[in-house]
Amino acid sequence: MELVEERPYRFRIDPHDGMRVPGVVFASRDLLSDAEQSLEQVANVATLPGIVSASYAMPDIHWGYGFPIGGVAATAVDAGGVVSPGGVGFDISCGVRLLAADCDRQGLRGMLPAIMDGLGRRIPRGAGPGGVWRLSGQEELERILRGGSRYAVEQGHGEERDLTRCEDGGAVADADVTQVSERARERGLVQVGSLGSANHFLEVQEVAEVYDEPVATAFGLARGQVCVMIHCGSRGLGHQICTDHVRLMDRAMNRYGITVPDRQLACTPVDSPEGRAYLGAMAAAANYGRANRQLLSDAARGVFRRVAGVRLSLVYDVSHNLAKMETHTVDGTPRLLCVHRKGATRAFPPGHPELPEDLRDFGQPVLIPGTMGTASYVLAGVPVGDAFHSACHGAGRTLSRHRAARTVTGRELRARLERAGIAVRPKSWRGLAEETPEAYKDVSAVVAATEAAGLSRTVARLVPLGVVKG
DNA sequence: ATGTAC
């Protein structure tokens, strides 16, 4: 794949083989050293009907189902633009939530082990069923699919600020529960309030460094402060919805005269029965994901309150696997776009009307979870931005799970982390080993590239004190 | 990511 360096941290793939727009990759050569397959995917995405501006990739790009993870693609609804489940990913509404404690590390004194033990007992994790919330039945599940974290808060599992500081106020209105299959519902019923496995986690962190004092203060963050970061998604429900609708679109594509270079790019027009069906089901999964993170927050709050008398306030909650209808100016004209962000975080600029009032002057918090045992970052959306106001979403995997697990055993890794002062409460040794830091790019380099490319500005760096893993 | 396969 030929990359033209337009300027530092911005590369272009010129249109070829049916690409309707160029590819644009924000990264350093170093970060792209093993990216040939995923760059191929960037080019494939550029062939989709209705795509505008470019097929974008963030610095943490790596290979994914159809679309690369770290990909951003927007299609114009009035130009037959398509929506593709592969552009969102299997874990619909996977995202990150950051809570700030009303104490610093010293304030916890010797209570961290007890907090970690409490979280270890209280936070459901790993594959399969099990969540903190036992639902009364399908009707209550539907209330979650429609109401997201708003419903969870109404039921007493949170506070008003949890909604104002959550993307979309905690819920989107366009969920269509009739497009969520029986199987997806069955899986979803028993997993509300659970982390899942793989790279999902709940971490107790400390703000190690503040790079932008005024913005950090507005976000509610200060050096030394204890935080809780939750990274998880919509579990089996989102996975099943993706599976169901990929199949439907794969069968329907012909009828719309759409051909794609890879079947995993299955798509139909946004403005088609299949497109609307997917977007309605996806919105339901988005609400489920927010409710999931809300209930885990509630559970973590209970542990912090009981063990240490500490309060946790929501800084922000943002998804990095979602397609959203947004209006953006393309070639001087405002257009309604379906913006796919897959492993990419929305990063609205200062002044954006959808930001909560107390954050509006500062830009949207962009939450970047790091690799286990390394740093995580908080960034902020910038006035100009790029890629429809998007940023990276994490470190980006480089080793397969299998290869990662061959480099270290879970027990060895836990001992290493504990020696570094990081408490670990794993569910499975194998799962822990698969998440070893060596399997990922350096999140600091990814964040530096994101800032240097002009996608966001760095606000704070957080380091783990304890990690709860699936 | 995922009851790590239809």
Image (cartoon, coloured by chain):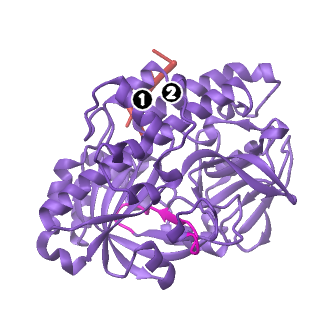
Q: CA distance from mark 1 to mark 2?
A: 7 Å
SS at badge 2: helix
Residue A58's x, y, as percent?
63, 59
Q: Amino acid at mark 1?
A: Glu
Would residue A87 be found to the left or right of residue A222 on screen? right
- Find residue A397 and report its horizontal and vertical position in percent: 50, 54
Chain identifier, colour red: B
Q: Residue at x 69, y 36 (%)?
A: A83
Q: Label 2 is found on which chain of the structure?
A: A
**Magenta stretch in the rendered image:** A360-374
Residue A187 percent location from the top left of the image: 37, 27
Q: How many marks?
A: 2
Residue at horizontal 71 percent and vertical 55 percent from the top: A56
Residue A177 got which mark?
Answer: 2
- Would residue A134 be found to the left or right of residue A54 on screen? left
Of the pair A159 and A370, the residue shown nearer to us:
A159
Residue found at x 16% / y 67%: A309
Q: Residue at x 64, y 69 (%)?
A: A351
The answer to if A369 sits in the magenta stretch is yes
Which one is nearer the viewer's eye here, A445 or A107?
A107
Helix, strand or loop at disc 1? helix
Residue A57's quadrant in the figure? bottom right
From the viewer's perspective, is residue A456 above or below residue A91?
A: below
Tell me whether circle 1 and circle 2 mark residues in contact (CB < 8 Å).
Answer: yes
Residue A142, numbered circle: 1
Of labels 1 and 2, earlier in sequence is 1
Chain letter, colour purple in render: A
Disc assigned to residue A23: none
The residue nearer to you, when weighing A412 against A356, is: A356
